[in-house]
Image (cartoon, helix red, strand yellow):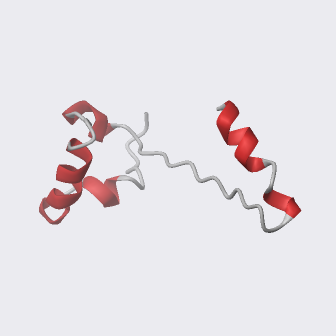
Amino acid sequence: MSDLKKKSDLTVEGMGRAPNRAMLRSVHMQDEDFAKPIIGVANLHSDITPCNAHLGNLAQKG
C-alpha cells in the first residue's frame, strides 16, 4: 500500500475522533481494522419508481 492517507483516516484518526473509534469498537472493530480502508455500500432500492425496483433483489443476493 502507498504512503497516501486513506479518506477513512478523516473518520478515525486523531484525538477528536475518539468518539468515532469508540462507536466502531462497539461493532467489534479491532486496532488492526483501523489501518484498513473503511468501505461503505449503499442500496438505493425504491418501490416508488421502476428504475431502482430491482436493487432490493440484487442486494439480497449479496
- Looking at the picture, tell me which residue is in the foreground, 58 or 21: 58
Left or right: where 27 falls relative to 43: left
On the image, the x and y values in percent for residue 18 come to 15, 57
On the image, the x and y values in percent for residue 21 come to 21, 51
Q: Residue at horizontal 38%, vertical 53%?
A: 8
| Above or below for 12 versus 38 | below
| Above or below for 12 versus 58 | below
Quadrant where the C terminus lies?
Answer: top right
Residue placed farthest to the front in the image? 47
The quarter holding residue 45 reads bottom right
The quarter holding residue 19 reads bottom left
- Looking at the picture, tell me which residue is in the foreground, 38 or 47: 47
How many tags in the picture?
0
- Looking at the picture, tell me which residue is in the foreground, 59 or 20: 59
Left or right: where 23 falls relative to 4: left
Q: Residue at horizontal 22%, vertical 33%?
A: 30
Quadrant where the N terminus lies?
Answer: top left
On the image, the x and y values in percent for residue 29 come to 26, 37
Q: Residue at horizontal 37%, vertical 51%?
A: 5
| Above or below for 49 versus 53 | below
Q: Residue at horizontal 23%, vertical 57%?
A: 20
